[in-house]
Amino acid sequence: MKTLITSGLALGLLATPALADMDAARALVDRYSQTPTFEAPGEPFDARACMADKSMFVIPLTNANPFNAAISQGFVDAAEMVGFSLRDWETQMDPAGWIQGINTAVAEGFDLIDLQGGLPPEFLVPQITEARAAGVKVTATHNWDATTQTVPDFMDGAANTDYVTIGEIIAAWAIVQTEGQVNALVLGPDEITPTAPLRDAIIGYLTDNCPDCKTTYINVPVNDWATQGQPAVQNALLADPSINYVLPVYDSMSQFIVPAIQIAGSDARIVSYNGTPFVLDMMRDGDIVEMNVGESLGWVGMAGTDANMRLLCGLDPVTRLNTPAFIFTDDNVETAGIPATFNDGYGDVHTDGFRQLWMLDE
């Protein structure tokens, strides 16, 4: 009888569904709900002295995206702080414009070209190779994931982002809010370099930590967001009314997703990444955008500048941006400003931190 009882208990335990790791999910959410702190990415150095005769040329994915424009402004601000020449090139998500920018930087004698904010360098290998042959260093900022993606050999370096952690924060939030019963629609434009680590981290975290959670992924190219984004989400919600979260990897997609949720009569909520001001405003003024993971983009630009200066000055390389993720919700979104900005809400510790790191006050 004892053996039978033990066997029955064992069979019962085997038949019990695995539970979501709620403690780990809550810990991750709690950690990134704290105000960011500054951690130096490397040793201090005299930036003004080492950059006295050097220059940078920044080519964003597109200036039409406020996200890219805000990172570029961080570069501009850093260059003004240190006192070196920097040019922010105007592009409109156009490979021809990217190529023209590289050619201009080479012709005008810039020392370094930075391809920032998701611009796919693999489209520009011939031009990058020619620029490097001419003595120009070519780097990227906020393009690859710091742990899962490898910087190609045709680049001189890159300052990378912890996209995996950002994706895991999004997934953990949904797990906590649903007590491990997530049915998520994940959206992303596959052609953008950071999409893969963000997408895979969201889906992977849910798969690994929440056995009862479900995900569906839809690829919506950036240029099709306005025409395909809303119908794709609307059709998915109508086909499966149990979907409770829509997780676009980039929050700017929200402007097309909110109408889809409303028309479908769904209770689904949006959780995403980027801290884009108009999306934070949507959060403050409504209830469909529930949480947004952001970074201070001025901080991103300064951190990218730091990595590039170290490369130009022959210092130990910095390959990971020191810009921490931060969770915005209804409880703290007003700290981002009214209207919201890309830099409010995170504190300003990075400004003094970089001034000290670059020895500007000595």
Image (tube, helix red, strand yellow):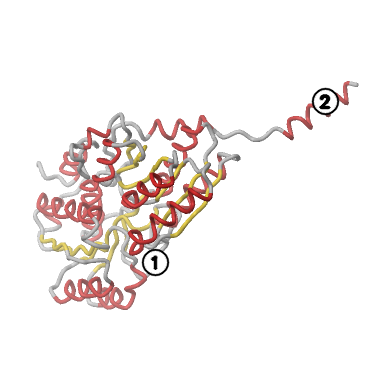
Question: Which-is-in-front pick, marks 1 and 2?
Answer: 2
Mark 1 vs 2, N-terminal side: 2
- Lateral position of residue 244 relative to residue 258, left or right: right
What amino acid is at disc 1? Pro
- Name the residue nearer the viewer: 26 or 162: 26
Q: Residue at x 60, y 40 (%)?
A: 211
Q: CA distance from mark 1 to mark 2?
A: 56 Å
Q: Residue at x 48, y 34 (%)?
A: 25
- Lateral position of residue 304 relative to residue 230, left or right: left
Q: Which x, y percent locates residue 104? A: 16, 74
- Name the residue nearer the viewer: 63 or 245: 245
SS class, disc 2 = helix
- Lateral position of residue 157 relative to residue 108, left or right: right
- Residue 128 location, quadrant: bottom left
How many neighbours does mark 2 have within 10 angstroms: few (below 14), some (14-19), or many (20 or more)? few
What amino acid is at disc 2? Thr
Q: Which x, y percent locates residue 107? A: 15, 77
- Seen in the picture, residue 335 relative to 282 is either above or below; the reply is above
- Name the residue nearer the viewer: 341 or 219: 219
Q: Residue at x 74, y 34 (%)?
A: 14
- Seen in the picture, residue 173 relative to 73 is either above or below; the reply is above
How many neighbours does mark 1 have within 10 angstroms: few (below 14), some (14-19), or many (20 or more)? few
Farthest residue, direction right: 1
SS class, disc 1 = loop
- Residue beneath disc 2: 6
- Residue 207 location, quadrant: top right
Q: Which x, y percent locates residue 167? A: 43, 46
Q: Tell me the tag on residue 338.
A: none
Q: Tell me the tag on residue 152.
A: 1
- Lateral position of residue 153 relative to residue 52, left or right: right
